[in-house]
Image (cartoon, helix red, strand yellow):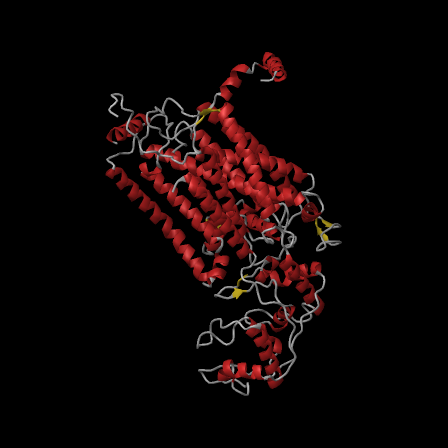
């Protein structure tokens, strides 16, 4: 392909890469939209979902089992927040028969119906409602002190070793943030009221909301980790190299020697 | 020339004798190749950095003393912040155009360092460093180190959480120096981390010492280049040892360079609108003792960060000093890489027993040692840089970070030597296939080229 035809192709490729990077940097596919917790009530939908997906291990009575092949814990008296969180994170039902892996992602409607059903059936400890958003300024400080060590600056997420992944916490339902802090699911420590008060949780929610809506540029980018920025720096450099190629107009560096001009004039 | 300009020039020429040196500069020949523009882009980025930097200096406060922010950003309104970070918030939210110029400054810094590195690679690969240009090559290496230092201090000045973490790592790397670590760290930071001295001092480094050194050495770099003339790529029928083929400074190169600097300014302005190069406000100010999970430096220091991340955590005592992994990874390794760069021109000359001066560039595949050393060194640096993103890679792939770290330990140890050996073998065979040897002097090189031309 000639250079003249290659340049627009390269330019469009750069635009496509920039758009993909912008999408990735903005957090990729977003989490499910915010919803309020459903109250406790037995419903046919919840009953069907429980019987299909949960009862095999946890039993119809929710008491779980203790035999070596099935260590499902009892659900009776568990916090509704924990059940909700386990479903939200896709931990249950497990993808693999041995109980590991991330399973399905539930629709909000299914998850709410299931939690409401189980709350009524197994007397789960009352569902946690999301706190009212408070002061983002305080929230940022609380987040930096208690959360950023694992969840990263601006709640970007990270790793915790041993294959454990710390999820990105931006754009979540306030209820999830409250649930996670109070329940301490999986590797996450549990934060009691004495450590982070309800009001401060609301502040954290407000801070993360501010991060979620942050659109610093027309590409919809918020604040970027240096790793994502490095990709944009590479794009900028590439654009500069293309400009140099365009301006200098000659790509050849080590030309194959041509035969010297024939003075005898055979051609 | 307009009469007024002519008059001015005449009166200046009478006093300063400009005509002769002026003509020499205006007739300076610039060979025509895109890769020769990389250094120019670096120079123009530096000009833009100085211009925007002067503007930013007007609003920046080099201090970590707490002050109360009062301004338009609700997240910090009425709250106490370190003065440096407060001034960044003010610059971004309350000073018209402040955020734009901060972003142009940061974008230009990325471009500056990237093109400096690429320029250095071009010089290294094509042999533009060979005698008599070793001097300028070494000036260039010092310039490269200075760009890194400028980048790091500039990254630190906003005193956001990432910047503070970076300063902390630099402080610890200094502490790891055997025997003198504590003294050197004290000498630079003026106390135990975090000191009230570090931001004021970094400010002086960033806006005074490093730019002054950069300006001085860039001037030396350019003067040596004019004095020694450009190198050039081989062109059929041109005796490159004696003549430089290219366009004169005036008007051709002047027009090209003017286009280039305007183009860079436009590109950086567009990038500043689209990409949040320098936005650190949601991260918040640095609080000593609080570190986030996702902390990386800017890309040009990824290789140092990567070395610290993947180097095994060893520590032993020897000769009455404690040698830690942080010292080996953070000081010895980068020192060794720069030592390779500094020593390479002499090694190559000694290894191939090269003679005389060299003015025509050479395909690195025609000189196996250079191909092997360049590929080995830069694949190593690139792998270390990739290792600095091990947490992000772990999240994206789902592979545990321990496995990724081991992957990088093994690849960093084995892939660069393997690649170097591969390029050595390939370029040696390529020479044999083309019935060529490594030329000992430039006459031999041009004979080979002429012979190839006759065969063709």
Taking B148 as reference, is B70 left or right? right
Residue B216's spot in the image, x, y percent?
55, 30
Residue B83's spot in the image, x, y percent?
70, 47
Residue B80 visible somewhere in the drawing: yes
Taking B77 as reference, is B134 left or right? left
Residue B134's spot in the image, x, y percent?
42, 30
Which residue is at a point 40% across and 47% down the rendered structure image?
B379
Residue sitting farthest toward the front: A267
Residue B158's spot in the image, x, y percent?
64, 47
| Up/down of B400 relative to B428, above or below | below
Q: Which of B212 and B32 lies nearest the eye of the viewer?
A: B32
Taking B146 as reference, is B125 left or right? left
Which residue is at a point 57% across and 53% down the rendered structure image?
A224
Quarter of the image with the N terminus of chain B is top right
Q: Which of B184 and A174 lies nearest the eye of the viewer?
A: A174
Quarter of the image with the C terminus of chain B is top left
Q: Which of A154 and B221 lies nearest the eye of the viewer?
A: A154
Residue B300 visible somewhere in the drawing: no
| Up/down of B407 relative to B144, above or below | below
Residue B186, quarter of picture = top right
């Amino acid at each position: 392909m000639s250079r003249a035809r290659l340049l627009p192709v390269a330019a469009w490729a750069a635009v496509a890469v920039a758009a993909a990077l912008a999408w990735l940097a903005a957090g990729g596919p977003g989490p499910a939209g915010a919803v309020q917790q459903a109250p406790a009530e037995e419903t046919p939908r919840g009953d069907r979902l429980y019987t299909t997906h949960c009862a095999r291990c946890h039993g119809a009575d929710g008491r779980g089992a203790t035999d070596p092949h099935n260590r499902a814990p009892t659900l009776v008296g568990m916090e509704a927040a924990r059940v909700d969180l386990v479903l939200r994170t896709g931990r249950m039902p497990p993808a693999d028969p041995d109980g590991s892996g991330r399973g399905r992602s539930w629709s909000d409607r299914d998850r709410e119906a299931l939690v409401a059903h189980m709350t009524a059936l197994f007397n789960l400890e009352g569902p946690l409602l999301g706190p009212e958003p408070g002061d983002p300024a305080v929230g940022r400080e609380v987040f930096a002190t208690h959360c950023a060590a694992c969840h990263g600056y601006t709640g970007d997420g990270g790793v915790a070793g041993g294959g454990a992944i710390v999820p990105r916490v931006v754009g979540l339902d306030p209820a999830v943030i409250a649930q996670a802090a109070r329940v301490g699911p999986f590797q996450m420590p549990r934060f009691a009221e004495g450590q982070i008060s309800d009001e401060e949780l609301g502040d954290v929610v407000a801070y993360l909301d501010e991060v979620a809506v942050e659109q610093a540029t027309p590409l919809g980018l918020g604040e970027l980790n240096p790793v994502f920025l490095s990709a944009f720096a590479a794009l900028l450099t590439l654009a500069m190299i293309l400009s140099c190629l365009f301006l200098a107009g000659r790509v050849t560096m080590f030309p194959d020697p041509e035969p010297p001009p024939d003075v005898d004039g055979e051609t | 020339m307009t009469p007024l300009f002519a008059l001015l020039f005449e009166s200046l020429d009478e006093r300063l004798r400009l005509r002769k040196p002026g003509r020499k500069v205006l007739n300076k020949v610039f060979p025509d190749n895109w890769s020769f523009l990389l250094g120019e882009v670096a120079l123009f980025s530096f000009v833009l950095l100085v211009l925007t930097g002067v503007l930013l200096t007007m609003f920046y406060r080099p201090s970590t003393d707490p002050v109360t922010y009062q301004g338009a950003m609700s997240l910090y309104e009425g709250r106490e912040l370190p003065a440096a970070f407060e001034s960044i918030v003010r610059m971004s939210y309350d000073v018209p155009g402040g955020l734009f110029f901060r972003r142009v400054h940061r974008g230009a810094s990325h471009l500056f360092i990237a093109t400096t590195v690429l320029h250095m690679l071009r010089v290294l690969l094509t042999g533009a460093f060979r005698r008599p240009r070793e001097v300028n090559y070494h000036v260039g290496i010092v310039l490269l180190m200075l760009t890194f230092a400028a980048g790091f201090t500039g990254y630190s000045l906003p005193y956001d959480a990432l910047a503070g973490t970076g300063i902390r790592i630099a402080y610890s790397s200094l502490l790891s120096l055997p025997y003198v670590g504590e003294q050197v760290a004290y000498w630079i930071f003026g106390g135990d981390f975090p000191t009230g001295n570090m931001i004021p001092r970094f400010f002086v480094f960033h806006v005074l010492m490093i730019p002054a050194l950069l300006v001085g050495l860039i001037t030396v770099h350019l003067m040596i280049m004019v004095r020694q003339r450009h190198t050039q790529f081989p062109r059929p029928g041109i005796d490159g040892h004696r003549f430089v083929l290219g366009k004169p400074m005036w008007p051709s190169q002047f027009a090209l360079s003017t286009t280039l600097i305007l183009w860079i300014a436009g590109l950086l302005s567009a990038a500043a609108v689209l990409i949040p190069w320098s936005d650190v406000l949601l991260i918040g100010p640095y609080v000593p003792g609080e570190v986030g999970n996702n902390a990386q430096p800017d890309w040009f220091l990824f290789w140092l960060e990567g070395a610290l991340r993947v180097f095994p955590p060893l520590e032993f005592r020897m000769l009455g000093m404690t040698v830690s992994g942080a010292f080996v990874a953070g000081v010895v390794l980068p020192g060794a890489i720069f030592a390779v760069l500094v020593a390479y021109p002499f090694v190559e000359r000694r290894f191939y027993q090269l003679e005389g001066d060299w003015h025509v560039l050479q395909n690195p595949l025609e000189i196996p040692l250079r191909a092997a050393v360049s590929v080995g060194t830069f694949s190593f640096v690139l792998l270390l840089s990739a290792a600095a993103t091990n947490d992000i890679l772990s999240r994206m792939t789902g592979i545990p970070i321990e496995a990724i770290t081991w992957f990088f330990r093994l690849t960093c140890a084995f892939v660069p030597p393997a690649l170097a050996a591969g390029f050595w073998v390939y370029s040696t065979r390529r020479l044999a296939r083309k019935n060529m040897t490594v030329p000992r002097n430039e006459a031999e090189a041009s004979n080979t080229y002429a012979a190839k031309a006759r065969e063709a």
